Amino acid sequence: MIKLKDILLEAKSPSIFIPRRTDDRVERMIKSYIRNGIHGYLDLSEMNLDKIPEILKGITLDGSLNVSVNPKIKTLENSPSEIMGNFRCHSTGISDFVGGPEYVGRGMFCYHCPKLNSFVGSPKYVGGDFVIVSDQLLTSIEGIPEVIDENFNIYAPSVNFTEQDIRKVCDVNGKISIFERSKG
C-alpha cells in the first residue's frame, strides 16, 4: 500500500500541485463586479497592473474605483468615463490625467505620484475633495476641473499659480489650499 506521505515526499511538486489560474484574475474579478451591477468599491490597488484594464473603458461605475499602488500605471487610459463614488489613483506613475474619468461623483485622490506635473485630462466635475500630491513642479492650472464641490488641495515643491488664479477657472465650493513641500 502506498501512503500519501510517501507520494508527497518522493514526487516533484509540479507534477502534484497545480497552481491556481491567476493570469486573468483581474478581468474575472471585474466581470463579476459588472455582472453584479457595478455598485460598491472596485479595489484594483496593489495588483502590479501596468494599465487600467480595457474592460472598464467608457463605462459608468456606480461605486468607487481604486487603482492605487500600481507604480507601472503610466496613464489613466481605459478609465470609466464616470465614477459615482471616489477615484483613487495614488502611488502610480502618471504624469497627467489624460484618459481618466470625466466625472467623479465624490472625491479624487492622487497622492505620491512622483511624475505628476499636469492637470490636463482632469475630470470636469469632482463632487468631493480633489487632492493632489506631486514631487514635480506644477506650473499651470490648465486642465483643472471646472467644478469641485468641496476642497481643492495641492501639495507640490513649487507652484506658479494662486488661489485667485484657480477660482477664475474652477468653481470650488470649499477651501483651496496650496502647500509647498520639499521634493522627494
Image (cartoon, rainbow, N blue to C red):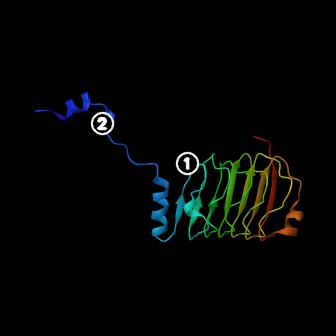
Q: Nearer the viewer, mark 1 or mark 2?
A: 2
Residue 167 located left or right of residue 112: right
Kindly identify the residue that appears in the image at 54 percent across and 55 percent down.
44
The picture places residue 57, in percent across and down from the top left corner, at 60, 64
Q: Residues within 10 Å of mark 1 (few under 14, many from 20)?
A: few
* Residue drawn at x 68%, y 54% as measured from the top left: 75
Q: In which quarter of the view is residue 151 placed? A: bottom right
Residue receiving disc 2: 15
Residue 114 shows which numbered tag? none
Element type at mark 1: loop
Q: Secondary structure at mark 2?
A: helix
User: Which residue is situated farthest in the left direction here?
Assistant: 1
- Relative placement, left or right, of 10 versus 124 is left
Mark 1 or 2 closer to N-term? 2
Q: In which quadrant will I find the N terminus?
A: top left
Q: For the residue marked with disc 1, what is the amino acid?
A: Glu
Question: Which residue is depicted at the point 49% across and 57% down?
Answer: 27
Left or right of 142: which side holds 149?
left
Q: Which residue is more in the foreground, 142 or 11?
A: 11
Image location (x, y in percent) of residue 38: 51, 69
Task: Give neighbour class at mark 2: few <14, some 14-19, many 20+ (Cα, 10 Å).
Answer: few
**Closer to the camera, 152 or 142?**
142
Q: Which mark is residue 46?
A: 1
Q: Is residue 109 above or below residue 21?
A: below
Q: Decide: is 36 above or below 50.
A: below
Cα distance between the residues tagged 1 and 2: 31 Å
- Amino acid at pointer 2: Ser
Name the residue rendered at 86%, 62% in the picture: 163
Quadrant, the C terminus: top right
